[in-house]
Amino acid sequence: MKRSVYLLLLTTSLLAACGGEEKKGGEAELAKLKKERAALDDKIAKLEVEVNKTKPAKGTPVSVVEMQPQDFNAYIEVQGSVNGEQNILSTPQAPGTVKRIMVRVGQRVSKGQTLAVLDAAAVEQQIKAMEPQVTLQKSLYERQQKLWAQNIGTEVQLMSAKAQYEATAKQKAALEAQRSMYTIKAPISGIVDAVNIKEGDIANPGVSGIRVVSNADLKVQANLGENYIGKVKEGNPVNLVFADGTDSLKSKLTYVSKAVDPVSRAFQVEVRLGSNSKLSPNMSCKMQILNYQNKGALVVPVSAIQKTADGEMVYVADGGKAKAVTVKTGRNSNGMVEILEGLQTGDKVVVEGYADLDNGKAIEIR
């Protein structure tokens, strides 16, 4: 029994001694590897520094435009509309209920043609009541004429019969004229542009009626703010852009108002077009008035101009770096601005990527 216990204790002691030696060996190996890794990291860091010294820095990618003289035109742009020289709303001369409309939109009509009829029953009854009186007075006058021809009666009787007949006829004519006030007639020859009434409506003079326009004498009109006074004049070239921009006309200003409207603080400009079957009154269009030209201008996009405390500037590509150049700008039109001072022919102005630049920063032209 004692022998067995002794053997067990001896075995345990041997195992403990072996485990301790293995633990000490693992810690030594770990320490060695860490030291080697630290030395390797230090070597890598030094090599990176050396490589970066010889490797050129990567520049900010930019796009540039080379400055070359070109034609520069500046326009004043305003919304206009096509109007007919003859564009008239025809209304009745007396108020009344619309009885019948005799035309439709788009129909061509002649001057004097009846477009609509209003209820004039009261006046028509008066006319009918006057007809027997007119017939009677006419008969009496004619009888008196025959008697006078036979030397029967007096001249006074003849003149009295004549006066009675003429007065009654004039009364009837006045009623017939009054009845015509209950009709709407075409004031010009043209096309029915709008029918603003319907049967059963009450039509009033100067308020509701039928619009007739003529495309024989068209014009485009627009209003400009008073700040443009003196900047446009008759004869200025004009581009008129219609509808979706696919159709346009070139013309000239034919009229510039000399007075500013006291309410809108604007003045009117006008382009006469004459007859044009492709255009219709009330069409809208964009009026571009050319009021400035420079045949040899240096221009850059408006977006490329930077605002600074010292004024306006642009970035120019100079030997792989961005160079800030102060400029003086002039007129701008269609997203482009005229450069009066600061740039030379051949300068490469940065037009894309300028937001990430500083003076002297490396750039890469793409």
Image (spheres, helix red, strand yellow):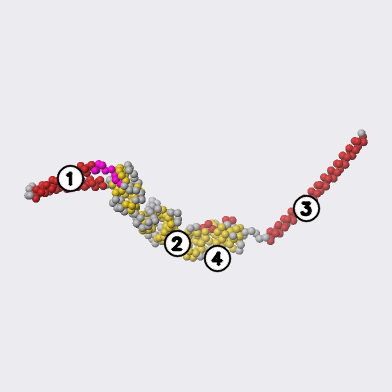
Q: Front-most of 183 and 324?
A: 183
**Residue 51 falls in which quadrant of the image?**
bottom right
In magenta, the rendered stretch is 116-124
Residue 346: which disc?
A: 4
Q: Quadrant of the C terminus?
A: bottom right
Task: Name the element at disc 4.
Answer: loop
Q: Are marks 1 and 4 in contact (CB under 8 Å)?
A: no
Residue farthest along the top direction in this orientation: 1
- How far apart are labels 4 and 3 at the CA level? 58 Å
Which label's residue is closer to the chain start, 2 or 4?
2
Task: Name the element at disc 3.
Answer: helix
Residue 212 in picture, x, y percent from top left: 33, 51
Query: Which residue is at a point 72% across and 55% down the rendered structure image?
Result: 45
Q: Amino acid at mark 3?
A: Glu
Residue 264 in picture, x, y percent from top left: 39, 51
Which label's residue is closer to the chain start, 1 or 4?
1
Residue 170 seen anywhere in this rendered image of the structure: yes
State how many labels appear: 4
Number of residues whose C-alpha sits closer than 10 Å to that of mark 2, classed few (under 14), some (14–19) or many (20 or more): some
Residue 292: which disc?
A: 2
Residue 164 seen anywhere in this rendered image of the structure: no
Q: Amino acid at mark 4?
A: Gly
Q: Which residue is mark 1?
A: 134
Q: Amino acid at mark 1?
A: Val
Residue 36: which disc?
A: 3
- How far apart are labels 1 and 2 at the CA level? 74 Å
Number of residues whose C-alpha sits closer than 10 Å to that of mark 4, classed few (under 14), some (14–19) or many (20 or more): few
Tell me the mark number nearer the camera, choosing from 1 and 2.
1
Which label's residue is closer to the chain start, 1 or 2?
1
Query: Which residue is at a point 31% across and 49% down the rendered structure image?
Result: 90
